[in-house]
Image (spheres, rainbow, N blue to C red):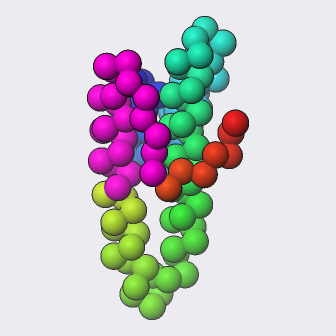
Amino acid sequence: MFCHLSAYAGFIVPFGGILGPMICWLSRKDESTWINENGKNSLNFQLSVLLYTILLIPLCFIIIGLPILGALWILKVICIAIASIKASRGEEFRYPLSIPFIQ
């Protein structure tokens, strides 16, 4: 659950949304396959959101990117909350729009 919740650090610290899940995953991935899977899912989603944000920045200059970027960040907040709740219950959650960078 902490792998998912640590992604909220990105709203406070630059790149905290990536560093939090990465630190959590790397420190505990060998202890459990459950932590390994949740850590990879969280990290892949955070990397995907970062990529989408970088790709949307040029569209912000023609205004269409702003609502899409806002929707992406709302999706991020909601998905992190849902993933954290499901992980605490022992259920699996797959993030939408997540690119599997880490297998």
Left or right for 75, reference 21: left
Residue 86 lies in quadrant: top left
The residue drawn where x is 54% and y is 36% is 41
11 or 1: nearer the viewer? 1
The percent position of residue 50, horizontal first and vertical second, equals: 55, 57
Report whether residue 15 is seen: no
41 or 52: nearer the viewer? 41
55 or 61: nearer the viewer? 55
**Quadrant position of the N terminus in the picture:** top left
The percent position of residue 52, horizontal first and vertical second, equals: 54, 64
The span picked out in magenta is 75-96
The percent position of residue 31, horizontal first and vertical second, equals: 60, 8
The percent position of residue 44, horizontal first and vertical second, equals: 58, 43
Q: Is residue 44 magenta?
A: no
The residue drawn where x is 70% and y is 36% is 103
Residue 13 lies in quadrant: top left
Above or below 66: residue 98? above
Give the tally of numbered discs: 0
Above or below 52: residue 11? above
Residue 43 lies in quadrant: top right
Report whether residue 38 is seen: yes
Magenta residues, dominant SS class: helix
